[in-house]
Amino acid sequence: DFLPLKCDACGEVFCKDHIRYDDHKCSSAYKKNVQVPVCPLCNAPIPVQKGEIPDIVVGAHMDKDCKYNPAQQKQRIFTNKCLKPGCKRKEMMKVVCEQCRGNFCIKHRHPLDHDCKGSSHPMSKA
């Protein structure tokens, strides 16, 4: 099965082991290859018209239309500061005391751990 095969993109002749575009690094593969490239910054699919070079189209997208926001990746997750005086811990989620309705860290979440000034009766029966 060593018949010569002609590449439908560049027109050169290859054996069965090198007929794939990637195997012979076909310079004309973009004309036939119908994969949709994805922007490496915003992960959006970039439409490429037949005959266009995907690298150039993605580059143009990155220069003009890209919605990538570098500040978005640096958003802080731990924003809920503990209200216990002297404690500097922050949690991802609010941990609210049912008696005083204050926000505390895991260590100080119980009324006895943060010298709770709320009502002596818990708000829920759970």
Image (cartoon, rainbow, N blue to C red):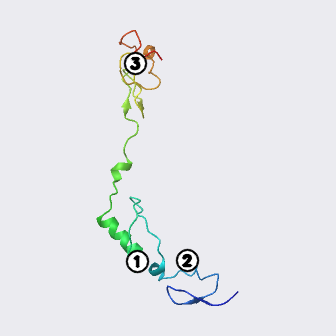
**Residue type, numbered disc 1:** Ile
Which residue appears at 33% of the width and 70% of the height?
Answer: 60
Q: Which of 9 and 103 is in front in this view?
A: 9
Q: Tag 1 or tag 3, which sits nearer the N-term?
A: 1
Relative placement, left or right, of 124 versus 63 is right
Q: Are marks 3 and 1 in contact (CB under 8 Å)?
A: no
**Residue 55 lies in what quarter of the image?**
bottom left
Identity of the residue furthest to the left in this view: 64
Q: Where 119 sits versus 96, above or below?
A: above
Relative placement, left or right, of 51 versus 6 is left
Q: Where 69 sits versus 92, above or below?
A: below
Q: Of tags 3 and 2, which is closer to the observer?
A: 3
Q: Name the residue under label 1.
A: 53
Q: Name the residue under label 2.
A: 22
Image location (x, y in percent) of residue 26: 51, 82
Image location (x, y in percent) of residue 110: 45, 18
Identity of the residue furthest to the right in this view: 1
**Residue type, numbered disc 2:** Asp
Quadrant that contains the N terminus: bottom right
Q: Name the residue under label 3.
A: 98
| Element under disc 2 | loop
**Residue 54 lies in what quarter of the image?**
bottom left
Tell me the CA gap for discs 1 and 2: 15 Å
| Element under disc 3 | loop
Identity of the residue furthest to the front in this view: 125
**Residue type, numbered disc 3:** Glu
